[in-house]
Image (cartoon, rainbow, N blue to C red):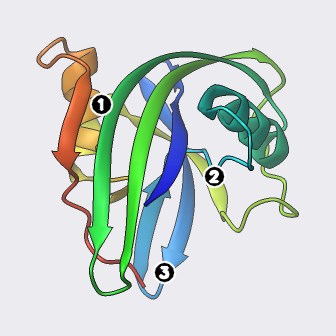
Amino acid sequence: MNVRPSAIILSNNSLLTLRYCYGDKHVYALPGGNPDSGECLSDALARELEEELGITAKVNTMVFSGEVLWPELGRETLHMAFEADIIAGIPELNPEQTTALEIVWIPLNELDTTLMYPNIGTHIAAFYQKKISPGHIGVIDQPYIQ
């Protein structure tokens, strides 16, 4: 199973996401990536944010963990979403480090109708509305994206 840390970065009640297009589907991903060998999750996430977005971030508490299981590919990923704060820089895509098309700030009240990767928009919105507690959310209902 792969492990992927990702960042929940908020500004003005909106979530920072990266937009990708697969076929005719737009998918909005939390920024993050895979740890290198010997790298802890918070260091990996901070590095990925620096590489992909040119920002220095403070990685805070883990909010959610959950698994995406894709039997179609024989692949599983454990996603761990951490709150993070930008402490330096303005997010800007680095095309040498990401295939994302653009940065999109999605209002929290639109997350339940947005296709995300990992698909935890409803959990994030509910957490910030204080309707659910942080923790393990189990298998994430993630549509297969080609």
In-front residue for pair 31/11: 31
Mark sitting earlier along the chain (3/2): 3
Which element is circle 1 on? helix
- Residue 56 in the image: x percent, y percent? 80, 23
Q: Residues within 10 Å of mark 1 (few under 14, many from 20)?
A: many
**Nearer mark to the viewer, of 1 and 2:** 2
- Residue 2 in the image: x percent, y percent? 49, 58
Q: Amino acid at mark 1?
A: Ile
Residue labelled with disc 2: 34
Contact? badges 3 and 2 (CB < 8 Å): no
Q: Residue at x 63, y 50 (%)?
A: 33
Which element is circle 2 on? loop
Mark sitting earlier along the chain (1/2): 2
Contact? badges 3 and 1 (CB < 8 Å): no
Q: Residue at x 43, y 64 (%)?
A: 27
Q: Residue at x 78, y 36 (%)?
A: 47
**What is the C-alpha distance between the residues marked 3 and 2?**
20 Å
- Identify the disc placed on residue 22: 3
Contact? badges 1 and 2 (CB < 8 Å): no
- Identify the disc placed on residue 124: 1
Q: Is residue 107 left or right of residue 100?
A: left
In-front residue for pair 101/62: 62
Which element is circle 3 on? strand
**Nearer mark to the viewer, of 3 and 2:** 2
- Residue 95 in the image: x percent, y percent? 83, 62
Q: Amino acid at mark 3?
A: Tyr
**What is the C-alpha distance between the residues marked 1 and 2?**
21 Å
- Residue 19 in the image: x percent, y percent? 55, 59
Q: Residues within 10 Å of mark 3 (few under 14, many from 20)?
A: few
**What is the C-alpha distance between the residues marked 3 and 1?**
23 Å
